[in-house]
Amino acid sequence: MTVYVPEFFDADEQEILRRYFTNLDGPVFALVNLPEVVKGALFARYSRSAKSLRRLFLDEFVSDLDLSGDQTVDATIGVTRAEDLYEKVFVEYGDDSVAQLGGVHLACEQASNLLTKILERGRLMSYLEQSTRYINYDARLGGRYRFYRDADILNGPFGTRYVGDIDRMFDAYSAMVETVTEHVRKTVKKGSTDSDFVFRQATRAKALDAVRGVLPAASLSNLGIYGTGQGYEALLLRMRGHALPEARQYAEMMLIELRKVIPSFLKRVDVPDRGGKWTDYLVERQQQTIELVDEYFGALDPDQSQEVVLTDLILKAKTNFWRRFVIQVRIYQNSNCSRRSDR
């Protein structure tokens, strides 16, 4: 079983897509040769759609664009750019600031919820993530629920149990979405000016928002990133040494696609005595931090204490159901509790 589900496009669709996307089947790809306003609008729509970015482009954007001038472009083999100036300034003169001047729109699809947090850490770039508030996550991808399937786990002794347990989580999520949607539509009053479409969309969003906490951390999401070469370099240096295998594997796919667009800015990422040393340093620093935390806090046992005392409860009834709850709560906590007890 493959980790990522490839997309398939017919010959006419491929002819169009290869002008604007750096590959046609992988989960990571860059957008090129499009006006900035189109890329921005495409990413904005992306966050509220269950479709992949390439399918969204074909279905909703192609008809509004003049594609005739881009017929000779093949972005899947890299975009021809004038790299000489960047090579001289960035490599020979070592002026890192030039890497702030070139940006890329990168689509990161089929990424686990854990991975999206790694990709967005630091907020050094701009991000648009597929919203669990507006998209029903029980839609299947390649015939299976949308959650990450690590190859090592699937091939190990717990592979069958892992898939079965998460399948049942998604079964529960799907059933809850329908039940809660029905409840919301029975209890929420439709506005006098609301159309049926607006009412159904709004109530569906309320239900999805209420139920999304059931989704496991392995749930897959689509994420759009816009950032500079310098931002991507910093991100890749961290990801290449991250403890999560998915992050390390994803970093390699990102590097391949980004090098089709801004190769000069990413030359040092996998050079052993440059980016390699940075990644090693980040890994060592993380490990040392863990060891220090264990040394200073790991041996402490938090004192047992009652953390919350309910001191007063006032309930007021109106029109046969509770309208207002006023709870006065005094919260106290033992001042000697360690940080570990808070977690």
Image (cartoon, rainbow, N blue to C red):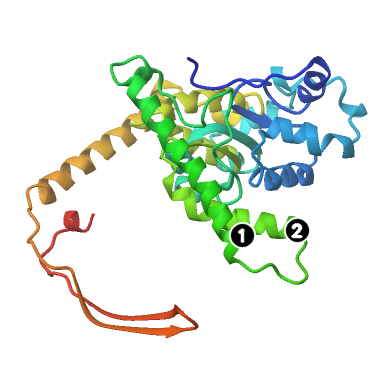
In-front residue for pair 173/307: 173
Q: Is residue 54 visible?
A: yes
Q: Is residue 105 left or right of residue 5?
A: right
Instruction: Give the SS element for disc 1.
Output: helix
Specify the quadrant of the image occupied by residue 289: top left
In the rendered image, residue 107, in percent from the top left (x then y), is placed at 62, 34
In the rendered image, residue 33, in percent from the top left (x then y), is placed at 78, 32
In-front residue for pair 220/329: 329
Q: How many marks?
A: 2
Residue at 51%, 30% in the rendered image: 145
Q: Amino acid at mark 2?
A: Asp
Specify few, some or many for label 2: CA neighbours under 10 Å numbering under 14, 14-19, or 20 or more.
Answer: few
Residue at 24%, 36% in the rendered image: 287
Q: Is residue 124 visible?
A: no
Give the Cα distance between marks 2 and 1.
11 Å
In the rendered image, residue 295, in percent from the top left (x then y), is placed at 11, 45
Q: Is residue 70 above or below residue 213?
A: above
Q: Is residue 59 above or below residue 253?
A: below
Q: Earlier in the sequence, mark 2 or mark 1?
A: 1
In the rendered image, residue 314, in percent from the top left (x then y), is placed at 32, 85
Quadrant the C terminus occupies:
bottom left
Q: Is residue 157 above or below residue 302?
A: above
Which residue is labeled 1 in the image?
185
Q: Is residue 214 left or right of residue 46?
A: left
Q: Amino acid at mark 1?
A: Arg
Which residue is labeled 2 in the image?
196
Residue at 52%, 32% in the rendered image: 146
